[in-house]
């Protein structure tokens, strides 16, 4: 409790935009303790003419005002600075509370939608086999409390019945007992939880993990036969230390299994004179610290959890280039089989066939050790493509081991990638993260699980991207080779090398751009002046929102120059706001007025009617079900999505980056050739200046951004590893995303590694592709001084008047004046330096 004058201020829960229901419950209790909840919930009536009030009414009014200000003060103190901006204009506690409730809890319609989702989640929830009673109760109570806070009446009986239906099989007998012996209509959740927890404790005393049982039984089925003690040798436990293949370091484990006798008269493994199958109750695992198994058999170690020190040791061993990897296979025979074998003893996918790799990093070196102690050198690591019934799949991080006879698929690596491997009878099934079957394998007579793969198209990047034509294909967002060659031959841009591969096939382009053949088209009318005709189309909704929460984008194309502008939207209703912004910018830049807008009959364009009448703009709409009449905008949106899809796929980026990829695509297309404007790029046709493209870099590649002195300590790193996601719209710089801090960074002091992409399975290490590009960074800096780097309208600026330049806030906020003071911006001749260009 903090003292403030004569008032004790209670400790306030902080609200940051998440878990409004929990925060509101805490605040209601707080207001109740201060006798303020009535003021917050109902408010009070302010009287303008106080002269008509009695003395008692005046006292009540002053008291209500005091309570209201006190309650409003508590709300201000209980929210962070970003939430405070939403309620800073509220004049009463009730007004501020209503704003927060409508924003984060929603009105009746929003509540109904949220209730539907919560009901579905409540109906589908099940207790996991590895989950404790307390963990499951916490999960289900979170849903129940959310339902109640949104107005749903959820009684204890309904919750109890749901829990009984959701229990795993090991609780089946206790579920039956509770249903038979207790009245569920009067059974409280707390007493029900206590009964289940007490039963769970009894289970833990006698139960052994199924994996541990299997490991124990396997461990005891070796050695020579005793007369009744099963398999075993006298003593038999000398090699059972806590690390596989090492000498015993822990006398506790050695002594516990030494010279034991089996049950009956046979000698075998056991502790002293009891239990022919051995007693592991006193054996402690040095990984997870639990009793009943050795560290070598620890399930936690195999699943990547457990003792932090030991895990770090394994990580260091993995990083060591000279580390020895064990696998169960044989070597050599000159011919590599096409069959792949599932192997639980193999630490990584391995093959001796170099020709099947689509990417291969030959700088990766390691060593493997086979079952007969033969050591083989790992000469590289890469990816292969295999064809399944569900399409082509990429198998990553495959070791290239020359001389290895068998192709091995590591079960452990499959599990690490999120796949599910299950064995039932003599069938092994491999499923993806959502349970879709990828492959099913039947065990052979020699107890092996062979997989026969058909390989996808093989095109090793190590040789392809040494060719600068391929490098520019990637830098230009997978723009087709014909357009690249046309750009170069006609000198439409500066800074690009000769392109000589007009007919080459890029597999990523095929997968991302394949479409039906075009229909024949007739000659169409063309505009003779800028803004005489504008084509527009809206694309969306996308299944995945951008980092700024946008699901749509809208494009505007000038028919005269074919210059392209793009805006991102959260809802279709924002289209008119985007058009008004587009109209202001383009008319100010060009000096012309928009005369005609051509669009489809989408509902978002119907709202433009009154605005068009006010400004004398003619609206051309397509005939019903005839999108071909708006072919320019329709085809351009398809091109944008195909190029964006190619860029995401080439660098294994998630769909959340679609907004950045689309913005980067528009930036590139404005500097690419088009048949409609011969001999010029759309940018040159609009601005009258030829652009340089030497600053272009591969979207999604790794970059190292310089950290200014003011933002780091003397011993801190001077750069941070990021992903290149586009070009800044207000600075002569690039946009980068830091996956560790999840921030967008604007920087021009950067070193690129275009042959690398981020490894999303590791927050630190990156996956390196095997092509290498030598870049003169000094030349890049000089070109940046000559080139004006502009980018498309970001999601945030297209839908609000916010001054934020990016969907995600940058590492630190800078004013536009500071940016201009620290950046040498060279506008094209003939244009004022202060010209506000939102589009690239």
Image (cartoon, grey):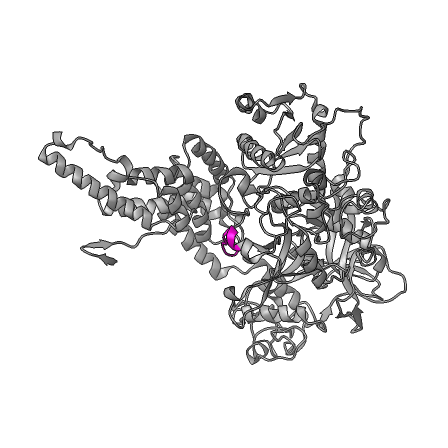
For the point 70% across and 47% down, which residue is it?
647
Magenta residue check for 25 = no
Q: Is residue 124 visible?
A: yes
Q: Can you tell which quarter of the image residue 602 is in?
A: top right
Q: Is residue 204 above or below residue 805?
A: below
Residue 815 highlighted magenta (yes or no)? yes
Point out residue 141 in the picture as x, y percentages from the top left corner. 42, 45
Q: Residue furthest left?
A: 55
Q: Dividing the image into 4 quarters, which one contains the C terminus?
A: top right
Which secondary structure dominates the residues rendered in magenta? loop
Is 549 drawn above or below residue 525 in the view shown? below
Residue with the most extreme top position: 623
Viewer-side residue, 312 vs 759: 759
Specify the quadrant of the image occupied by residue 705.
Answer: bottom right
Is any atom of residue 158 visible in this view? no
Work out whether residue 220 or residue 724 is closer to the camera in this orientation and state it.
724
Report the quarter where the N terminus lies: bottom left
Check the image and report above or below for 834 versus 634. Answer: below
Question: What x and y, as percent, mark residue 684?
Answer: 72, 41
**Which residue is depicted at the point 87% across and 60% down?**
336
* Residue 537 image offset from top left, x and y in percent: 64, 30
> Seen in the image, is 73 located left or right of residue 424?
left
Question: Which of 762 and 698 lies nearest the eye of the viewer?
Answer: 698
What is the x, y in percent for residue 666? 67, 42
Residue in view at x 19 percent, y 56 percent: 5
How many numbered circles are shown? 0
Q: Which residues are magenta?
A: 811-818
> What residue is rendered at 36% in x and 49% in y?
79
**Residue 685, quarter of the rendered image:** top right
* Residue that protrudes farthest toward the front in the picture: 830
């Amino acid at each position: 409790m903090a003292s403030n004058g004569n008032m004790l201020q209670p400790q306030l829960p902080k609200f940051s935009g998440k878990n409004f229901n929990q925060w509101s419950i805490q605040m209601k209790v707080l207001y109740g303790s201060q006798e303020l909840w009535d003021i917050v919930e109902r408010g009070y009536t302010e009287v303008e003419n106080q002269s008509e009030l009695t003395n008692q009414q005046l006292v009540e009014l002053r008291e209500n005002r005091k309570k209201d200000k006190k309650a409003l003060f508590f709300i201000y103190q209980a929210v962070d600075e970003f939430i405070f901006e939403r309620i800073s204009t509220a004049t009463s506690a009730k007004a501020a509370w209503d704003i927060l409730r409508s924003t984060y809890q929603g009105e009746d319609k929003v509540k109904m939608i949220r209730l539907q989702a919560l009901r579905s989640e409540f109906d589908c929830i099940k207790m996991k086999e590895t989950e404790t009673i307390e963990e499951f109760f916490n999960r289900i109570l979170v849903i129940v409390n959310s339902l109640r806070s949104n107005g749903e009446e959820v009684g204890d009986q309904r919750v109890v019945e749901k829990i009984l239906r959701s229990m795993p099989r090991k609780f089946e007998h206790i579920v039956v007992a509770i249903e038979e012996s207790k009245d569920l209509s009067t059974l409280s959740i707390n007493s029900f939880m206590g009964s289940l927890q007490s039963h769970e404790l009894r289970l833990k005393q006698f139960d052994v993990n199924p994996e541990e049982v299997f490991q124990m039984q396997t461990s005891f089925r070796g050695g020579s036969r005793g007369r009744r003690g099963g398999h075993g040798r006298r003593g038999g436990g000398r090699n059972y230390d806590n690390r596989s293949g090492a000498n015993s370091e822990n006398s506790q484990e050695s002594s516990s299994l030494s010279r034991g006798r089996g049950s009956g008269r046979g000698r075998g493994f056991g502790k002293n004179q009891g239990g022919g199958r051995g007693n592991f109750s006193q054996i402690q695992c040095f990984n997870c610290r639990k009793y009943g198994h050795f560290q070598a058999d620890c399930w936690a170690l195999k699943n990547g959890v457990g003792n932090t020190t030991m895990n770090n040791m394994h990580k260091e061993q993995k990083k060591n280039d000279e580390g020895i990897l064990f696998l169960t296979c044989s070597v050599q025979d000159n011919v590599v089989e096409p069959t792949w074998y599932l192997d639980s003893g193999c630490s990584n996918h391995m093959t001796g066939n170099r020709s099947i790799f689509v990417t291969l990093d030959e700088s990766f070196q390691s060593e493997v050790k086979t079952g007969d102690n033969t050591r083989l050198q790992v000469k590289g690591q890469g990816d292969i493509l295999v064809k399944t019934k569900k399409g082509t799949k990429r198998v990553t991080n495959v070791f290239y081991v020359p001389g290895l006879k068998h192709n091995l698929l590591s079960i452990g690596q499959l599990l690490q990638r999120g796949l599910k491997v299950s064995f039932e009878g003599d069938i092994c099934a491999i499923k993806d993260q959502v349970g879709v079957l990828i492959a099913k394998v039947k065990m052979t007579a020699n107890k092996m699980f062979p997989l026969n793969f058909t390989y996808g198209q093989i095109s090793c990047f190590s040789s392809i991207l040494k060719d600068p034509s391929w490098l520019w294909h990637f830098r230009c967002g997978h723009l087709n080779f014909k357009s690249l060659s046309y750009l170069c031959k006609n000198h439409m841009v500066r800074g690009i090398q000769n392109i000589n591969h007009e007919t080459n096939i890029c597999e990523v382009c095929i997968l991302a751009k394949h479409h039906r053949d075009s229909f024949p088209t007739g000659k169409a009318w063309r505009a003779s002046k800028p803004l005489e005709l504008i084509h527009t189309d809206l694309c969306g909704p996308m299944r995945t929102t951008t980092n700024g929460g946008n699901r749509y984008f809208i494009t505007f194309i000038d028919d005269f120059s074919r210059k392209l502008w793009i805006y991102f939207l959260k809802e279709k209703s924002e289209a008119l706001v985007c058009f008004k912004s587009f109209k202001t910018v383009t008319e100010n830049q060009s000096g012309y007025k928009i005369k005609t807008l051509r669009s489809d009959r989408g509902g978002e364009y119907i709202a433009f009617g009154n605005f068009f009448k006010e400004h004398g703009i003619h609206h051309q709409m397509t005939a019903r079900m005839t999108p071909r009449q708006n072919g320019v905008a329709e085809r351009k949106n398809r091109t944008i999505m195909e190029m964006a899809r190619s860029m995401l796929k080439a660098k294994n980026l998630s769909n959340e980056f679609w907004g950045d990829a689309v913005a980067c695509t528009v930036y590139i297309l404005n500097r690419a050739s088009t048949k409609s404007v011969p001999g010029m790029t759309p940018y040159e046709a609009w601005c009258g200046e030829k652009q340089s493209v030497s600053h272009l870099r591969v979207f999604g590649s790794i970059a190292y951004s310089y950290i200014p002195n003011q933002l780091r300590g003397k011993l801190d790193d001077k750069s941070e590893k990021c992903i290149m996601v586009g070009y800044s719209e207000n600075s002569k710089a690039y946009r980068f995303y830091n996956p560790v801090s999840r921030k967008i960074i604007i920087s021009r002091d950067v070193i690129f590694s275009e042959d690398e992409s981020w490894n999303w399975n590791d927050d630190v290490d990156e996956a390196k592709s095997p092509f290498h590009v030598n870049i003169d960074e000094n030349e890049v800096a000089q070109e940046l001084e000559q080139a004006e780097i502009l980018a498309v309208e970001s999601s945030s600026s297209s839908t609000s008047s916010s001054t934020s330049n990016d969907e995600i806030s940058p590492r630190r906020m800078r004013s536009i004046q500071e940016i201009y003071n620290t950046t040498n911006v060279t506008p094209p001749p003939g244009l004022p330096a202060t010209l506000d260009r939102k589009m690239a």
